[in-house]
Image: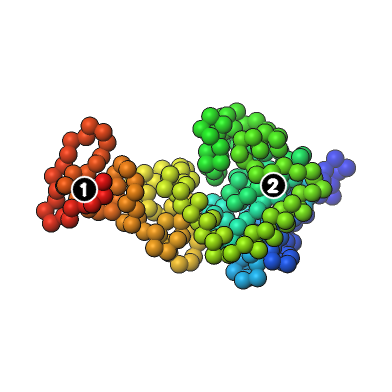
Amino acid sequence: MTSPQQIEIPPPSPDDVLYEKRETFAVITLNRPVVLNAINWSIQRRLWWALGERKDDDVKAVILTSNGRAFSAGGDIQSTPPPDKDPTPSGMQINLKIWEMQKPVIAAVRGYAVGQGHELAGMCDMTVASEDAVFGELQIRHSFGPPILVTPFLTGIKQAKEILMLGERISAQDALRLGIVNRVVPADELLSTAEDMARKMAALPQKTVRSNKLLVNRVYELAGFHQALAYRRPHHRRHPGHNRRGTGPPPQGPPRTGLGGIPGLARRELHTTPVGVHAVHGCAGKQGNSPGAPGARPRKRRRGARPCATP
């Protein structure tokens, strides 16, 4: 029995995340409006399943949105543990599933997208916000760091520090200025705008659309994207290649092929980095010397090492 001041919170339900196929795209909807779509184990399991439906060849793009007056208010701090022992994917695994899937994902954000909601929207390939949308990394108010360190890759260094160190709410227009979102539209045009973007991408050559997504991701991976996400793991500096998807068991599936999941783009094939390139592809350096940093002492060529033609 609840008092008039209390709101009855519905129990976890299979309808906490909805999946609908429309034309050439799919719409995934967070559906816990009573609690502002706060993320709990139920949403995590069902969102993981819904993202898995991307394997449908008729679906060329995915829209991630919500019911109610918020995209997501972040993690559900009042969530109870699941009643079974079935595995629950972590927030890191869900975010990286969006990052690594080939099909583009568009976030359509209304109302609050703070904490984990901010990061979930930020991890999508494109983000459309309604004029009433509010973003922010508010965890610092509760002495927490960001669960998913994606903000520095969305904004510049000064803006990232402002967002993470002040913990302020960010309006839709400020989010557009900071690079957190792609477009700001009236609330009644939010979903139609996202659908138009999905249709445009669906009409383009799919091989190129998917390749371009992976190529952009590859740039950020080379800049240390996975290592930055692993900041919560104290031993990640000693084992940089171990479980780089985050804490907990990694998702099941084939191993990554090359950087950014693009076949053939193995590390040994990168010959263009001006500093440290010879160490990357395993040669002895030009005329036996590694370029190293300016002013570094040249080192002798290893016995049997091949010379390198890279300038």
The answer to whether residue 211 is left or right of residue 283 is right
Front position among marks 2 and 1: 1
The answer to whether residue 228 is left or right of residue 127 is left
Q: Mark 1 points at which residue?
A: 285
Q: Can residue 29 be seen here?
A: no
Q: Where is residue 221 in the image (x, y as percent from the top left)?
A: 45, 49
The residue under label 1 is which amino acid type?
Answer: Gly
Q: Mark 2 points at which residue?
A: 128
Q: Position of residue 62 (x, y in %)?
A: 66, 59
Number of marks: 2
**Res 110 quadrant in image:** top right
Q: Nearer the viewer, residue 128 or 44?
A: 128
The earlier-in-sequence mark between 2 and 1 is 2
- Label 2: element kind: strand
User: Which residue is pictured at 46% across the width and 43% down the height?
Assistant: 228
The residue under label 2 is which amino acid type?
Answer: Val
Q: Note whether 20 is above or below 105 in the view shown.
A: below
- Label 1: element kind: loop
Disc 2 residue crowd, few under 14, some 14–19, many 20+, Cα 10 Å = many
